[in-house]
Amino acid sequence: MDEYYELPTRMQVAEMGVDIGLKCPTNVAEMWARILHRLSLYTSGELTAQLRVGVDSILDNLPYRMPTARINVDVPYQEAYNAGFAGNCTQFSSTLTLHALVSAVEQSIGHDHVDIMPVRWYRRGLRDRCQGIVEGAGYLCDVDEL
């Protein structure tokens, strides 16, 4: 499928990359650059171009030059989970842009593709963090019943 109706603009993707590169801890920014790079290998057309804009924008805003060989390293699931559990540190607009990109990739390559799995583990970490916050506040919350 080559059409994505809610794909962000390249400008929005570039802003998202700057936001990730500057506001996230360096290991998390590097992780997102690696995830987006790996996903760009399996997409085509405008989606690939936008993923590359995101990767380049993140890499340009890291405090160091990431070695080229490092960008191809798989993201371990535990690393993705830990990043999700630590919480989101970007602006809301950047979070939406990242979600739109990843959703378009999932639509294109399938939600069970091996390179989409770190994203799923990241989401699992976010869910567990939210559940812990709600439970810590004294509210009963069973995510599976929602």
Image (cartoon, rainbow, N blue to C red):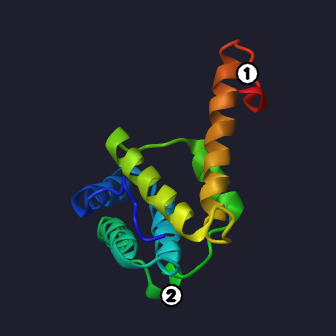
Q: Compared with residue 92, is residue 79 higher up or lower down, i.e. above or below?
A: below
Q: Which residue is mark 2?
A: 69
Q: Residue at x 50, y 87 (%)?
A: 69
Residue 126 at x, y percent in the picture: 61, 41
Q: Which amino acid type is marked by label 2? A: Ala
**Element type at marker 1?**
loop
- Residue 46 numbered tag: none
On screen, 35 above or below 45? Answer: above
Single out the residue that lies furthest toward the bottom. Answer: 69
> Can I make out residue 46 in this image?
yes
The reply to whether residue 62 is visible in this rendering is no
Amino acid on which disc 1 is placed:
Cys
- Does dot 2 land on a helix, a strand or a loop? helix
Query: Is the C terminus in the top left, top right, bottom left or bottom right quadrant?
Result: top right
Which residue in the protein does label 1 denote? 141
Badge 1: few (under 14), some or many (20 or more) residues near its Cα, within 10 Å?
Answer: some
Q: Is residue 67 left or right of residue 76?
A: left
Give the image location of residue 117, x and y in percent.
66, 63
The residue lying at 48 percent from left, 76 percent from top is 43
* Nearest to N terminus: mark 1 or mark 2: 2
